[in-house]
Amino acid sequence: MGTLPERRNIPPWVKVPEDLKDPEVFQVQTRLLEAMFGRDGCRIPYIEQVSKAMLELKALESPDFTEVVVYGSYIYKLRAKWMLQSMAEWHRQRQERGMLKLEEAMNALELSPWMN
């Protein structure tokens, strides 16, 4: 997804400082982030508004995974975490199905022995 967006402001629905304590943290495969959040994270503000939470992405030592930190009230950050993990799993399965279809198509294009 390239460079991670840098946090410049706190959404009005996040109460400072109590909602910034004890965030929910989980990891997502980096390759899924663009599908989830759009190019350069353009969908993050919308997802934050819908979930009433604040998201922060942090690069890890491994380029394969990115840490997602969710801030907000207890119920909103749990709901946002569940929603984002569900989205990541859906995109992962969708990409996997796409690879299987590609493999089937490539196998179908192979020449039969009688055509050699």
Image: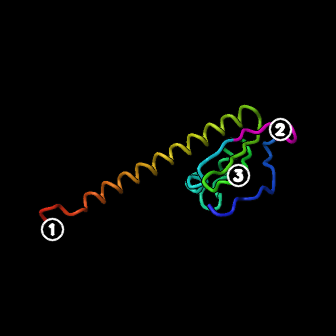
Residue 68 horizontal/vertical position (percent): 69, 47
The residue indicated by pointer 2 is 21
11 above or below 80? below
Q: Which residue is mark 3?
A: 57
Residue depicted at x 37% and y 51%: 100
What's the magenta region? 16-25
N-term-proximal mark, 3 vs 1: 3
Q: Does 72 sit left or right of 107 as displayed?
A: right
Badge 2: few (under 14), some or many (20 or more) residues near its Cα, within 10 Å? Answer: few
Q: Callout 3, which amino acid? A: Leu
User: Spatial distance from mark 3 to mark 1, Cα to Cα?
Assistant: 53 Å
Answer with left or right where residue 60 lies relative to residue 91: right
Residue at 15% across / 68% down in the picture? 116
Q: CA distance from mark 2 to mark 1?
A: 67 Å
Q: Quadrant of residue 110?
A: bottom left
Q: How is the image coloured?
A: rainbow
Is residue 74 covered in magenta?
no
Q: Quadrant of residue 83?
A: top right
Characterize the local packing of mark 1: few (<14), some (14-19) or many (20 or more) Cα atoms within 10 angstroms: few
Nearer the camera: disc 3 or disc 1? 1
